Structures are given as C-alpha cells and as structure tokens.
Image (tube, rainbow, N blue to C red):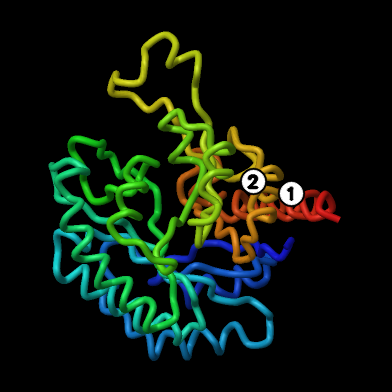
C-alpha cells in the first residue's frame, strides 16, 4: 500500500514538446491521450521518441487514453483496438476510453451493443495484458438520451459489469463527474474501489446556493471543474481509501478544465495540483503505518 504515483494527462499531439516540461516539473507518470481520433499517430515511432526524451528520468507512461464512441463508429473502435494492441510499446498497462453510446438513445437501449463490442475488446485487452478503464464523464448526455458515454453513473456500471464480467474491464474514476450528479464521491469510492483501474485527478466545485435558487435543470452550469486542491473533494481521504483498497497505480491530473488556471496559467495550476496531491499522499501514507 501507499505506492500511488502522481502524474498528468498529456495530449498525443503535444507529447514531444511538453514532455521535457512535465519531467522538469516533477510529475511521476503520464497518460498519453487523444480525443475521438488518434489523428494518424504511429505508436511505434512515437514510443521510440517518447522513450528517448524520458531517458533515465524515472517518469513512466501509465496509460493510453482514446475517448471515443466505439459502439457507434467502427473506425473509432478500430483505433481503440490499436491502442489496446500497442499500449505495450509505451509499457502502459491501462487503456482509458468511454463506454460508447447509441447517440440519442438510452443506456438500456445501448447495453446489448455494449456487451457485443466490449466483450470483444476485453478479450483483446486480456490477450495484450492491459486493462480497459471506462472514464465516467456524461459528455452532456443523460440516462434517456446519451451522446458518447453510457458509463457515467453507478446504475450504468452495474449493468455494464454484469454484461461484461471481467477483471480486465473497470473504471477510470474521478470525483468531478460524480459531484456534478450530486453523488458523494467518498462513499462511492468505498464501494467501487475493486473496479477502479485508473484515476484521473480532476475535481469540481458545486455552487449550492445557485442550485437552491434555480435548481439543476435551468440551462446554466452549476458545477465548475477545478484542479485537485481547489474543488470540493478531500484528496487525502480519496488516497487513503485507494490505499486501503490495494490500488497502486497513479492519479493522472486531467488539466485544461480549470477556469482560473488556464491558458498561460495552465502549468501553474498543474503544479499546484501536483504538489497538493503529493502532500495528500504523504499524509495518507503516514496514516497507514
């Protein structure tokens, strides 16, 4: 217990330019990620260049992320298969993605297709020694009308893991998307730790006075995504629960969402989050001895 590393998510098309900065800042891991498409990325060449920059710094690539809709689009599914089959080039053990959806349809309607597609993807993952983590972002969808990810809430998770029962399929969890659904992330984490294969470091702040006045279905954003340390979650408690559950991978800070630390201040926010999580890790680790 107590071996959780702190890293950050780096966009695939920026990794070669940002990696020296990430190493210098003191991050311990990275998730290499893409939105929807790999954009022609060649993992053989990219992995070679990445390893050259990493050198003997000690930084590792914990995961590959491709956040797409493999249920609806064959090309996106094939690119996800490519990630699963080639994650080993980066020595990555996790592939993060969305559960996919049938656009405009309900979670229930998508479940047979989920079982078919992820049943096959999980077999590929097992053959390649990697685990698939479903990121829990609603992507502006909801139960009865999804966009690209049915895997955003516990009821859907229960259905997903019943449909595809495998140790190679789990959650890529973060508290921000649970807070915005008014779910207690701490109590949820206690229940779901065994299925968590990866963690994103992103938090949220809920404007409760605004909700009490206007409610949550009024067309405005009552939930602001923040870096860890600036939102509503207790990260020392989160790390403690992960430790107790035997989780020993990393927390990859997911940036580019904070309304204050953005643009020219992005790296400043990333380092604040890194230092906060390292401090929380130190306190959590001390509590287990």
Question: If the image is split into quadrants, where does the C terminus sit?
Answer: bottom right
Horizontal placement of 12 versus 18: left or right?
left
Check disc 1 and report the residue beneath it: 280
Horizontal placement of 255 versus 240: left or right?
left
**Dot 2, how many residues are within 10 Å of its Cα: few (below 14), some (14-19), or many (20+)?**
many
Residue displayed at 60% across by 37% down: 233
Residue displayed at 60% across by 82% down: 54
Q: Nearer the viewer, residue 121 or 258?
A: 121
Quarter occupied by residue 129:
bottom left
Q: Nearer the viewer, mark 2 or mark 1?
A: 2
Check disc 2 and report the residue beneath it: 238
| Secondary structure under the numbered disc 2 in the rendered image | helix
| Secondary structure under the numbered disc 1 in the rendered image | helix
Image position of 51 with respect to 229: above or below: below
Residue 187 location (% of width, % of height): 57, 36
Answer whether labels 2 and 1 touch (C-beta < 8 Å). yes
Image position of 208 with respect to 90: above or below: above
Question: If the image is split into quadrants, where does the N terminus sit?
Answer: bottom right
Image position of 131 with respect to 285: above or below: below
Horizontal placement of 135 versus 139: left or right?
right
Residue 74 location (% of width, % of height): 14, 69
Residue displayed at 42% across by 80% down: 87
**Dot 1, how many residues are within 10 Å of its Cα: few (below 14), some (14-19), or many (20+)?**
many
Name, please, the residue furthest toward the top.
213
Q: Which mark is residue 133?
A: none
Mark 2 vs mark 1, CA separation in Å: 9 Å
Residue displayed at 67% across by 62% down: 4
Residue 99 location (% of width, % of height): 29, 56
Quarter occupied by residue 189:
top right
Residue 221 location (% of width, % of height): 37, 28
Which circle's residue, 2 or 1, is located before the other in the chain?
A: 2
Q: Nearer the viewer, residue 203 or 18?
A: 203
């Amino acid at each position: 217990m107590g071996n959780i590393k702190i890293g950050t998510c780096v966009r695939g098309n920026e990794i070669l330019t940002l990696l020296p900065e990430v190493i210098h800042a003191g991050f311990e891991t990275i998730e290499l990620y893409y939105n929807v498409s790999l954009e022609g990325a060649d993992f053989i060449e990219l992995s070679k260049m990445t390893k050259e920059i990493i050198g003997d710094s000690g930084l590792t690539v914990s995961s590959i992320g491709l956040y797409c809709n493999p249920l609806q689009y064959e090309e996106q599914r094939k690119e996800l298969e490519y990630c699963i089959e080639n994650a080993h080039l980066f020595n990555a053990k996790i592939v993060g993605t969305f559960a996919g959806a049938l656009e405009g349809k309900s979670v229930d309607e998508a479940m047979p297709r989920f079982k078919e597609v992820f049943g096959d993807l999980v077999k590929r993952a097992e053959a390649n020694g990697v685990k698939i983590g479903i990121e829990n972002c609603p992507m502006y969808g909801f139960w009865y009308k999804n966009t690209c990810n049915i895997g955003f809430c516990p009821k859907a998770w229960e259905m997903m893991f019943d449909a595809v029962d495998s140790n190679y399929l789990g959650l890529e969890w973060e508290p921000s998307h649970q807070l915005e659904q008014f779910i207690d992330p701490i109590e949820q984490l206690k229940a779901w730790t065994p299925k968590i294969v990866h963690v994103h470091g992103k938090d949220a702040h809920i404007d409760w006075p605004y909700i009490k006045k206007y409610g949550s279905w009024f067309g405005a954003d009552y939930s602001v995504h923040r870096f860890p340390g600036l939102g509503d979650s207790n990260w020392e408690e989160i790390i403690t629960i992960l430790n107790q559950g035997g989780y020993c991978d990393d927390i990859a800070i997911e940036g580019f969402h904070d309304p204050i630390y953005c643009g020219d201040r992005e790296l400043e926010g990333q380092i604040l989050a890194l230092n906060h999580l390292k401090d929380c890790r130190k306190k959590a680790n001390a509590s287990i001895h």
